[in-house]
Image: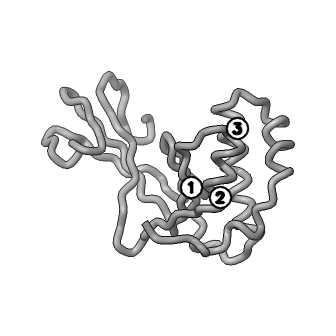
Amino acid sequence: MASLNIDYIERRGLIAWNDSINNLEYTLTQLTRIFQETLTNNKLQVVGARYASIRLYLSDNTVLTVDNIDDVSTVDQYFLESDYPFWIFDNTVVLCIRYVKDIQGKAAVTLSALTVLLYKRNDLSLDEAKIIVREKDFSNKTRTNAKTI
């Protein structure tokens, strides 16, 4: 918030990613299954993309949702730094791996995302999360054998 020059915030907000015609997401079905099984959350979905365009939306008087964000006239928008290798939005994991050329690099991003989820959502220590993730083999599952959504 400080980097956006917002001193005090008592507003309603939403952080959202924006789709772009040049940045189509694609579902990673094998990874989705692995993430769901590992985290025991069948609502999780793993998608891949080139990058994520992230915005913070703030409104003083309206509860913002994904459905009404375009209809609210009193919304302030702020672009957030978006060169992170992955983003986690509720039950969607966005792996920004389309520009990563080698399989090991894609696997490293995937392993990091799963480690963070185990650490944050399953209340595991970071060391426990790393041990669980090391047992997974992502080298063959991050190939682009996915479907576009």
Mark 3 neighbour density, 10 Å: few (under 14) some (14–19) many (20 or more)? many
In the picture of the structure, the residue carrying the numbered disc 1 is: 46
Residue type indicated by callout 2: Leu
Q: Tag on residue 31?
A: 2
In the picture of the structure, the residue carrying the numbered disc 3 is: 118
Q: Disc 1 and disc 2: Cα gap in Å?
A: 6 Å
Q: Disc 1 and disc 3: Cα gap in Å?
A: 15 Å
Rendered-image quadrant of the C terminus: bottom left
Q: How many marks?
A: 3
10 and 136: which is toward the camera: 136
- Looking at marks 1 and 2 on the same chain, the residue that comes earlier in the sequence is marked by 2
As drawn, 85 above or below 105: above
- Quadrant location of residue 29? bottom right
Whether residue 38 sits left or right of residue 55 in the image: it is right
Whether residue 19 sits left or right of residue 46 in the image: it is left
Secondary structure of the residue carrying numbered label 2: helix
> Disc 1 vs disc 2: Cβ atoms closer than 8 Å?
yes
- Looking at marks 1 and 3 on the same chain, the residue that comes earlier in the sequence is marked by 1
Rendered-image quadrant of the N terminus: top left
Image location of residue 84, percent across then percent down: 57, 55
Residue visible at 30% across and 28% down?
12
Secondary structure of the residue carrying numbered label 3: helix
Mark 1 neighbour density, 10 Å: few (under 14) some (14–19) many (20 or more)? many
Secondary structure of the residue carrying numbered label 1: strand
Residue type indicated by callout 1: Val
5 and 97: which is toward the camera: 97
Image location of residue 8, percent across then percent down: 35, 24
Mark 2 neighbour density, 10 Å: few (under 14) some (14–19) many (20 or more)? many
Residue visible at 49% across and 40% down?
90
Image location of residue 85, percent across then percent down: 61, 58
Q: Disc 3 and disc 2: Cα gap in Å?
A: 15 Å
